[in-house]
Image: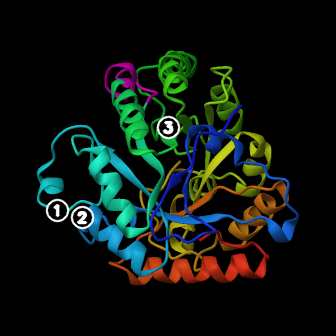
Amino acid sequence: MKRRDFVKVAGLGAAVSQALGGQACLERGKAPFSKKEVAMKLGFHTDAFNTAYFSFEKCLEWAKANGVHWIECGLIDGVSWIHGLGYQPHVAMYEDPALLRKKMEGYGVAFSQVDAAYPLSGKDGPVRGVPYVLNAIRWAKLIGCPCVDTTDGLHAPPDLKDAEAMEIMRGCYEQIIEVAEAHQITINIEPHGYFTTNPDRMAEMLAFCDSPYLRMNMDTGNTFIAGRDPVEFLKRFIDRLNHVHIKDVSESLAAAVRGKDTGIAVSQCALGDGVNADNIRLCLEVLRDHGYTGVLSMECEGQGGPMIERSLAWMRKTLAELQIPIEG
């Protein structure tokens, strides 16, 4: 496969002035580097600022002030009053992607992924989820974002057998991947729900389509809260990996719901402060040894800045200890 031309991103410097296109995103899971030479990219999900009622541009300001060059946000397929008033840190797809891309370049920030994770496992998956993801693919292509995140529902659909829900999702992904291939946008499946946090089901889902554009977004927090071993989960799917969510879990939350829930909306715990910190560190070692050079997207409550800034400091310290350079 040939790489697309890299997209120039203002303000990143000579070493990291690239926002990766779809083909490049496929290839960045492996690199012919030694352990000490493997550089990863550090980003964050704007969910961190949901409770602070930041606008997306305020998230860009935070990223620039803290030297973070990769961002991930949710996509809104329509009009929302709270977003329109500037109180939501996500992006509506009516916003012009060319103009937004120009604005982001001014902050030295590029998308690593956009989040279109409407649950595809229920009866409304084909009706609501598929059109949403298809619109997200087209929008991502226009703004130069390489990946779109997808998932299933948190719980088993109450009116479907598991096999029926899996067949619904198979049909959804067949439609989605046809469009994704045409636009050269990678579709990531995130472990976040009833099916996707089950590694055997995740394996089935990644086999829905024989396409290099269907890959996985690892989430260290969701796999842990679902009662799985994040390190073993990552190892099983390392060759299908395309993007990573780094999420810790507080001791109290783990005691209350681990093995009962399948996903965390936003972790109320800074990275490094929870009971999942050792697993995160081990996952980073696995990624380093495999040659992963993609994005590590931090997911946690930001408290308007202080908590995500602690997370950022912990990530930089941990990556340095593991001899993993940060690109940018």
Q: Secondary structure at mark 1?
A: loop
Label 2 and label 1: CA atoms lie apart by: 5 Å
Q: Quadrant of the N terminus?
A: top right
Label 3: how many residues lie within 10 Å, few (<14), some (14-19) or many (20+)? many
Q: Is residue 58 above or below residue 139?
A: below
Identify which residue is drawn at 33% across, 74% down: 61
| Numbered tag placed on residue 55 in the rendering | 2
Label 1: how many residues lie within 10 Å, few (<14), some (14-19) or many (20+)? some
Check disc 3 and give the amino acid type: Thr
Q: Secondary structure at mark 3?
A: strand
Q: Quadrant of the C terminus?
A: bottom right
Reading the chain from its start, which is encountered first: label 2 or label 1?
Answer: 2
Check disc 2 and give the amino acid type: Ser
Reading the chain from its start, which is encountered first: label 3 or label 1?
Answer: 1
Check disc 1 and give the amino acid type: Gly
Reading the chain from its start, which is encountered first: label 2 or label 3?
Answer: 2
Q: Where is residue 199 shown, x and y percent of the image?
A: 70, 39
- In magenta, the rendered stretch is 120-130
Q: Where is residue 284 shown, x and y percent of the image?
A: 73, 65
Q: Which residue is mark 1?
A: 86
Q: Is residue 213 above or below residue 67?
A: above
Residue 128 in the magenta stretch? The answer is: yes
Q: Secondary structure at mark 2?
A: loop
Q: Where is residue 93 shown, x and y percent of the image?
A: 27, 41
Q: Is residue 94 left or right of residue 194?
A: left
